[in-house]
Image: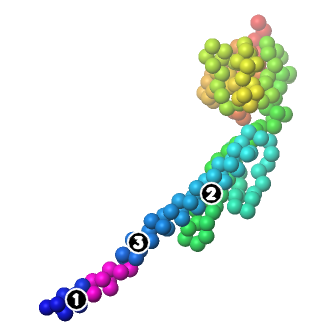
Amino acid sequence: MNIVGTMVGMSLMATAAPAVLQMSIAPAEAQVRARNFAVAETAAVVFAATYEGTTDIPVDTDTCTTSEREGTQNAYSVTCTHGTGQYVQSVTRAFRLAVPEQDLVNGDGAGSGRTFAFETPTRYSGHQCPIDDPWGVYGYNDRYYQALGGACKPIDAWTQVKYQFSDPDAWLYDINNINGWGDHPDYDNASST
């Protein structure tokens, strides 16, 4: 009886040994993957932060490659990879370059017969103007321009729908074709008042 029990036990151990071995090294493999992921993520975040809001074209490195995002202007993706073999981990992050100042100037209304109370900002941040200063011209942009990296977006430029249904006669500065949304339908129809 002992011989039969021993043989059965040894047979079971022989068939279970690969699974037991795999279970014993799984935590070590997970730790290597997690470490490689952390290195790749750190590289991607640092790369994106380095180029975010600048006008410099990103340059690929040994571990990070960039690609332009389809359908967007000045937007890129960076993919950073770390590790070898089955432990390779990749992370992708997106970032946007600043629009060069000459591309942001929407004009001064020349050719449309329009004049505006304030000069059009040459650079916008990603922040919306507050409700109490919907164009940012009454102190908000003066206070926060440097910290935000540009002027705030006026309330009429928050969305394409707001832009299309806004009144160019009420604009405090020229936002025609802001965000590449095209000429406003009423822009060339300047009121005579």
Q: Specify whether 39 is left or right of 28.
A: right
**Count of labels in the image:** 3
Query: Which residue is tagged 1?
Result: 6
Magenta span contains residue 12: yes
* Residue 184 x %, y %: 71, 25
Res 189 visible: no
Please state the extent of the stretch shown in magenta in the rendering: 10-18
Query: Which residue is tagged 3?
Result: 24
| Marks 2 and 1, how far apart at CA | 50 Å
| Marks 2 and 3, how far apart at CA | 26 Å
What kind of residue is marked 1?
A: Thr
26 to 42, vertically: above or below: below
Query: Which residue is tagged 2?
Result: 40
Q: Are marks 2 and 1 in contact (CB under 8 Å)?
A: no
Residues packed near mark 1 inside 10 Å, few (<14), some (14 to 19) or many (20 plus): few
Pick whichever of labels 1 and 3 is earlier in the sequence. Answer: 1
| Marks 1 and 3, how far apart at CA | 24 Å
Nearer the observer: mark 2 or 3; the answer is 3
Residues packed near mark 3 inside 10 Å, few (<14), some (14 to 19) or many (20 plus): few
What kind of residue is marked 3?
A: Ser
Residue shown at the point (83%, 26%) measured from the top left = 107
